[in-house]
Structure formats: C-alpha cells, structure tokens
Amino acid sequence: MNTITVRILVFFLSLFIMITVFSQISIQFKDDYVTETAVIYSSAEKVTLQGVYVRNETVINSRANGVISYTCRDGSKVANGSVVAYTYANENDILVNQQIEKLKAEVELLESAQNPGTTAVVEPAFISAQIDEQYQTIAFLIAENDLESLDAERKKLQTLMDIYQIVINEETDFNNAVDNLNLRIEELEKRRREPSGMIVAENAGYFIGHTDGFESKLSPDTIDSLTADEIKDIIDESRKNKSGGSIGKIVDGYEWKMIGIVDPRITDFRVGNSVTVKFSSTPDTVTAVIDSMTETDDPSENIIVLSCDELTYNLVQRRAERVEIILNDYKGIKVPRNAIRFNKDNEKGVYILLGQRIAFKKIKPIYECDEYLLSQITSDSEYVSVYDDIIIEGEISADLYVEETSEDGEESTEEISRPVKNTEKSDSFETEPEEDGSEETSEQND
C-alpha cells in the first residue's frame, strides 16, 4: 500500500471514530433528555370579590355656614373636642391660607438645606447618590399610586437638591430666596381673614371628611342581618358616589369589618382562617380573620365577613371596592410531578443534569397540586435548588449517574438504568391534589 492510500484510510478511520464518539455523547447525554429549569414559584388559594367596609361611624353634625377647610387628613386620629374644620366666608380666604402654609414650608426646606453643619462635611458624590435613590423612591410611589407618601418624599428630594447646589458651589446660600418668600408671606398675611366658625369632633376616633348615607345602616351590630341582595344593593349604590350631606364622620377605633359574597364551591375558606387582603385602590395589604361564612338560598353564594385592626388613609376612602382574599400563600421551588422519583433509600426527589453527569436531589414538599409541587427553598445541596435542570424525560444509565457524595466524602456510583422517558404521573404521591380554587403566580428570581 502506498503512502497516499494509507493516509486516506487513516483520515476516514479517524473521521468515523470522531463522528461515532460525538454522536454517542450527543445521543446519551443531551438529545435524550428533556429538562425543566427549577424556578421560584408561588401558589395560593385566592378569591376576588366586591367587599363592603363596615365600621362604627358617628356623623359630625354642624350648622356652620360658609366654605369648609379641613384641618386634618382622612384617617388621622383626633381627640374629643378637637377642631376638624374651619369655615370661611369664601374660597379665596382658604386659598390665601393655603398659599401662606405652602410658602412657610418652602422657607423651612431652604433653611434646612443651607445648614452649615450639613453642607460643610458632605461630599457631592454622596448627595448625588442620595438624589438618585430618592428619585427612584418617588418613581415607585407614583407607579404604586401611593399619593399619601408622595408629598413627604418630594420634600426630601427638594432638600437634597438644594444641598447639592451649595456643595458644588452653584449657590453659596439661599438667603435671597428666603427673604423673597418671607416678603410674599407678609403680603398674604395682610389679606388673611379669620375663620367665621369652627367644627369640632364630638368624640375621639379617626376622622373621615365625607359621608355616604350608609353610616347608620352599616355597623358591626347590624352586619349579621344583611342579606346577599342587600349587600349587592349597597355595592351598586356606592358606585354612584353619593354624598350623605354631612361634613364628615368619626370612626370609633381602628377595627373594621368587610362583608362580601363568595362562591363556596371554589374556596376552602373557614371561620377563623387568617387571610391576606389586597385592594384594587391602594398598594396596601392587610391581614384579616374570617369571622363568619353564612349560607344563602343560592348554593353558589356564601356571605363572608372579615375583621381587621389596621386602618390607613387609603382604607377609609371608599364604602365598597374590589379586593382579593388570599389564603395559604406558599412559595417554593417548582417541581413537575412527572419528574419525581425515589432513590434507593426511598427518598422522594428528582434527577438533575449536573454538568455532564446526573445526580439525584431530594425535595421538601410544602404544597402539592395535580401538575406540580413546591419544594422548600433551602441552601442544603442535597435538595433541589433554583436553576437546577430537572430531568423530565430520558434514560438514566449507570455510566452517567453519580451520587453527590458518599459518607467518606468520595463520589460513588449506583448500578442503575432507570428510564424516565414518556413517564406518567406516579402513584406514590403522599398528598391529595388541591381543588380547583387554587391560583398560581410565578416570580422572577433575582
């Protein structure tokens, strides 16, 4: 055989060997496996309904004439006999007072910003970083529609920006601006008029500057007598934004209740359950307790009553609104049911791709349904972790399988050949599937 022929044969033989090796690796390791990446997932039983707020409310009766200017915000606590509003002859008198208060607040911010104890030691980079952080805070509040906190954060941002101007020598001080503001305040003070009357709270509690006409009908004492039809009528009437005709009311204490209608066929709510309540009008969430679940003539309708002891500005603005009631909110690592197997010690877990090998990892179930279960999030390497590639389909052979570690710290293999291709759900699951009332939401893991 000549040299050229030998070289050609060696080339094709080498090529054949390389193709065979790579195809076997591809077939055995990659192409035969279908995997699903483990991610953090949450699952909870929840229901959405129109809820009606029920509180102990006392209407503030007053015969005062004129334009009303309130002295306290909705949801603020007031003492017995404290002033909740003043009356003026016209709106212009109120506007003058508001402008004076606004200008005084600006003077206070400027004087605070030019405090030598602050501007003399602070670095520009530090203030710049704080400005960026405060900007992000304000953007978040706007996105969440949290207007209650927005004004205070705006003032903080303004103060930081004023300090920054002095630190980088754009301004030496704000004395001229303060003097100009004080001149404007003096001019407005000359036009200021005293109120023609005042309105006081007849008892202590939390102030709300409006009424809707349901104050006498809805109270914790009458809530048990309400029917499903009456609840629906209240919800419909509340959408019309009717005014009760009075200037406001006092809520006796911070405890309140909510009543609504739920479908018992899609929920497993029970009296005494602690639930989380989310609201459509505010980012606030509260924890409430189910006081009662009352059957009606309609099998698809139960009257649910919640009680809560958290009261905020946002929670006194409406009589009724859409809420979401959440029970048993679980968060863990999502594991498909058809991936679950048992090792030689009869421990429940899954096989995962670990580099170019396969390993068995245990799971700690905290929630189960028909399609998947949630495994507890843990730092223990023996248990499934976020971003593990869980094998759904494929044949696990002994030459690829490896246990994590043996007792002496060395890797050990187990003589197995376990097919997991085209598998069906295991009959070895220890818990019954959840009912259809469950809803799930996936979360992005940072």
Image (cartoon, rainbow, N blue to C red):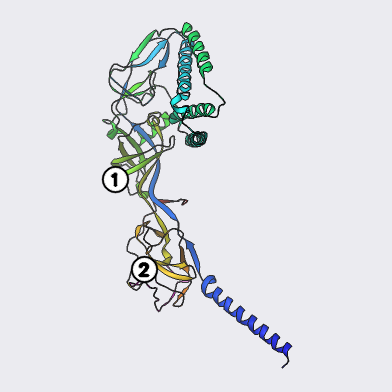
Residue 86 visible within the image: yes
| Mark 2 residue type | Asp
x and y percent of residue 444 in the render? 47, 51
Frontmost residue, 188 versus 435: 188
In depth, the one of 62 and 26 nearer the eye is: 26
Q: Does residue 395 sit above or below 227 in this rendering? A: below
Residue 273 circle label? 1
x and y percent of residue 120 in the render? 47, 28
Q: Is residue 343 above or below residue 166?
A: below
Q: Nearer the viewer, residue 192 or 431?
A: 192
In the rendered structure, the answer to whether residue 53 lies left or right of residue 186 reads left
Type of amino acid at the residue the image marks with label 1 = Asn
Work out whether residue 422 can be spotted: no
- Given the current orientation, which residue lies at the most extreme front position? 120
Q: Is residue 378 above or below residue 419?
A: above
Badge 1 local density, few (<14 within 10 Å), some, or many (20+)? some
Magenta: main secondary structure equals loop
**On the image, numbered disc 2 is attached to which residue?**
427
Q: Which residues are magenta?
A: 402-425
At 30% from the left and 30% from the top, the residue drawn is 254
- Mark 2: secondary structure: loop
Give the mark count: 2
Number of residues whose C-alpha sits closer than 10 Å to that of mark 2, classed few (under 14), some (14–19) or many (20 or more): few
Local SS, label 1: loop
Q: CA distance from mark 1 to mark 2?
A: 31 Å
**Percent x, y of residue 171:** 55, 24
Give coordinates of residue 119: x percent, y percent. 48, 27
Earlier in the chain: of badge 1 and badge 2, it is 1
